[in-house]
Image (cartoon, rainbow, N blue to C red):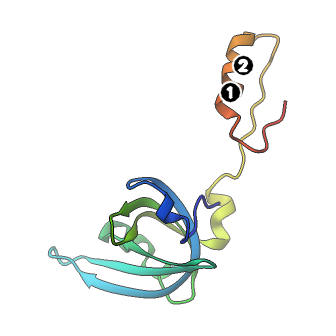
């Protein structure tokens, strides 16, 4: 369900959409200028740790998940500069809800008798990076 880990984040580009999982090790909650709560979360996986920024709108929905030793999956955008790598969270879900929340595979059923061969070839080229693509 993830596409990166704490050690490979440095290889990603600023702004990339990333999904990472791990244990919450620390949560620092602050009040914004508007008086809303947000959090800075340290997420640890088998390779290290990364800071996750959870802005107030998302924090209001997931604050109960942001407790120490909770296992979560985070989807967000990478914020990267010369000195640090952070993830701006868009979604935080419990690890045990991953299968019902995110797909691990997609299946296509095509009627090859009614589809042009050139279109099929184009679709196959687009999907080739998928490791489980079958003819």
Is the residue marked by circle 1 packed among few (<14), some (14-19), or many (20+) residues within 10 Å?
few
Inter-mark Cα distance, 1 to 2:
6 Å
Instruction: Indicate whether 99 appears above or below 40.
Output: above
The tally of labels here is 2
Where does the image place residue 35, in percent across and percent down from the top left? 18, 78
**Residue sitting farthest toward the front:** 82
**Residue sitting farthest toward the left:** 33
Q: Secondary structure at mark 2?
A: helix
Residue positioned 50% across, 58% down in the render? 18
91 or 120, which lies in front?
Answer: 120
Is the residue marked by circle 2 packed among few (<14), some (14-19), or many (20+) residues within 10 Å?
few
Residue positioned 68% across, 15% down in the render? 119
Where does the image place residue 5, in percent across and percent down from the top left? 58, 68
Residue positioned 16% across, 73% down in the render? 34
Can the viewer see residue 117? yes
- Quadrant of the frame with the N terminus: bottom right
Instruction: Indicate whether 61 appears above or below 18.
Output: below
Where does the image place residue 23, in percent across and percent down from the top left? 57, 82
- Quadrant of the frame with the C terminus: top right
Q: Secondary structure at mark 1?
A: helix
Q: Which residue is mark 2?
A: 121
Residue positioned 71% across, 34% down in the render? 128
Q: Are marks 1 and 2 in contact (CB under 8 Å)?
A: yes
Where does the image place residue 118, in percent across and percent down from the top left? 70, 12
Can the viewer see residue 115? no
54 or 34, which lies in front?
Answer: 54
Q: Which mark is residue 68?
A: none
Q: Which residue is mark 1?
A: 125
- Left or right of 6? Residue 102 is right
- Left or right of 99? Residue 61 is left
- The answer to which image quadrant residue 114 occupies is top right
């Amino acid at each position: 369900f993830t596409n990166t880990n704490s050690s490979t984040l440095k290889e990603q580009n600023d702004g990339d959409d990333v999904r990472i999982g791990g244990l919450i090790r620390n949560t620092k909650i602050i009040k914004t200028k508007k008086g809303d709560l947000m959090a800075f979360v340290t997420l640890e996986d088998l390779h290290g740790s990364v800071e996750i920024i959870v802005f107030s709108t998302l924090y209001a929905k997931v604050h109960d998940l942001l407790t120490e030793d909770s296992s979560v999956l985070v989807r967000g955008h990478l914020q990267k500069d010369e000195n640090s790598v952070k993830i701006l969270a868009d979604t935080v879900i419990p690890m045990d809800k991953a299968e019902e929340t995110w797909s691990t595979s997609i299946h296509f059923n095509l009627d090859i008798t009614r589809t042009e061969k050139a279109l099929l070839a184009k679709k196959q080229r687009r999907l080739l990076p998928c490791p489980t693509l079958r003819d």
